[in-house]
Image (tube, rainbow, N blue to C red):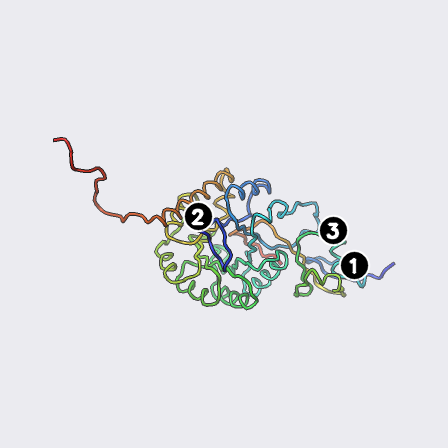
Amino acid sequence: MAEKTEIIVNGKQTQVSTAWTVDDLIQDLELSGRQVAVEVNGQIVSRDRWSEQTLGAGDRIEIVHFVGGGEEEKCLMI
Amino acid sequence: MSDDLVIAGRKFRSRLIVGTGKYESFEVMRQALEASGADVVTVAVRRVNLTDKSKESLLDYIDRDRFTLLPNTAGCYTAQDAIRCARLGREAGLSDLIKLEVIGDERTLFPDNEGLLEATRALVKEDFVVLPYTNDDPVMCKKLEDAGAAAVMPLGAPIGSGLGVQNPNNLRIVLETVSVPVIVDAGVGTASDATITMELGVAGVLMNTGIAGAKDAVSMARAMKLAVESGRLAYRAGRIPKKLYAAASSPLEGVLT
């Protein structure tokens, strides 16, 4: 049984195995192949670095994608 | 003769840019995008819903070979938020085009031009192609151009209001003031609004609600396509001057007496 660590994904407390990478998280969330962008603690992690970037306790992860939008939207996203 | 819309060296055949929000379904949106003839479509950047992964993805309904995505920073109220949103949009969309919005007031959705200018400068430094949504203010538009904006997008009327261009004279002055494309963003309610806007000589029109909110969005999309084309053609054709009195168009010679 791998050790667990707590991170925050899109504002929600989430438990993941220690030494997980961004790529592991994306796969676990079934978002592989989807057009998403990932931010860890306010810094964008580009797709080619997903498998290098490991997640540590308390990390704040934001995973975003495109939704319908035009001129008018007043909800703040993050 | 080709009459492309050119933004930062990129050519687009259509002068109509459409949003992808507020449609009753993705399928209606897909048909409306098709009917609009637009080449560029705006999209918003939002958190992925991790609890409901069954949800269909917007991008499943947008043919990326056909449409250029223009991510926006809608919903951002500070320069910092807008810059962050722009970076995420670039990462997700692999494109450096950004429709930059820094909103200053929730009720009117008027821009915060101070924050907008700051964000424009920052994003231009990061090699974004910045298209800022701003007021119909020639001074502000000039400042944005000087800051490196690839186009300026003054509002015709408040976002989603459908009022049509409220101050055509300001837009005329904007057109004289800047040399980057002027794209009227927001306020168009129906086809005639789009035509009148294009007749001013602006480079393009961006709209969402005018189409998505119509009873028949797909028909309105087609109406807007024709309206934008008509307005552009009329502008290029050069209208007759307005006169107070009649001028007969049939010859007076040979009139029966």
What is the secondary structure assignment of the residue under circle 2?
Answer: loop
Label 3: how many residues lie within 10 Å, few (<14), some (14-19) or many (20+)?
Answer: few
Chain assignment, label 2: B
Q: Do labels 2 and 3 share a chain?
A: no
Q: Nearer the viewer, mark 1 or mark 3?
A: 3
Circle 1 sits on which residue?
A16
Give me the C-alpha separation between circle 2 and circle 1: 48 Å
For the residue marked with disc 1, what is the amino acid?
Val
Q: Name the secondary structure under disc 1.
A: strand
Q: Which residue is drawn at 68% across and 59% down?
A: A38
Q: Do the residues labelled 1 and 3 touch (CB within 8 Å)?
A: no
Q: Nearer the viewer, mark 2 or mark 1?
A: 2
In-front residue for pair B39/B206:
B39
Q: Which of marks 1 and 3 is nearer the N terminus?
A: 1
Q: Is the residue at mark 2 from the same chain as the one at mark 1?
A: no
Q: Where is residue B222 in the image (x, y as percent from the top left)?
A: 48, 40
Q: Do the residues labelled 2 and 3 touch (CB within 8 Å)?
A: no
Inspect the image, locate mark 3, and give the three-letter code of the amino acid beneath it: Glu
Residue at the spot 57% in from the left edge and 42% down from the top edge: B30
Give the residue number, with chain letter if any, for mark 3.
A30
Where does label 2 land, which residue? B188
Vertical position of residue B191 compared to residue B109: above or below: above
Q: Which residue lies furthest to the front in this view?
A: B1
Marks 1 and 2: in contact by CB < 8 Å? no
Residue B54 image position (x, y, % from top left) = 70, 45
How far across and how far down the image is residue A30, in percent? 74, 51
Residue at the limit of the structure toward the top, as seen here? B256
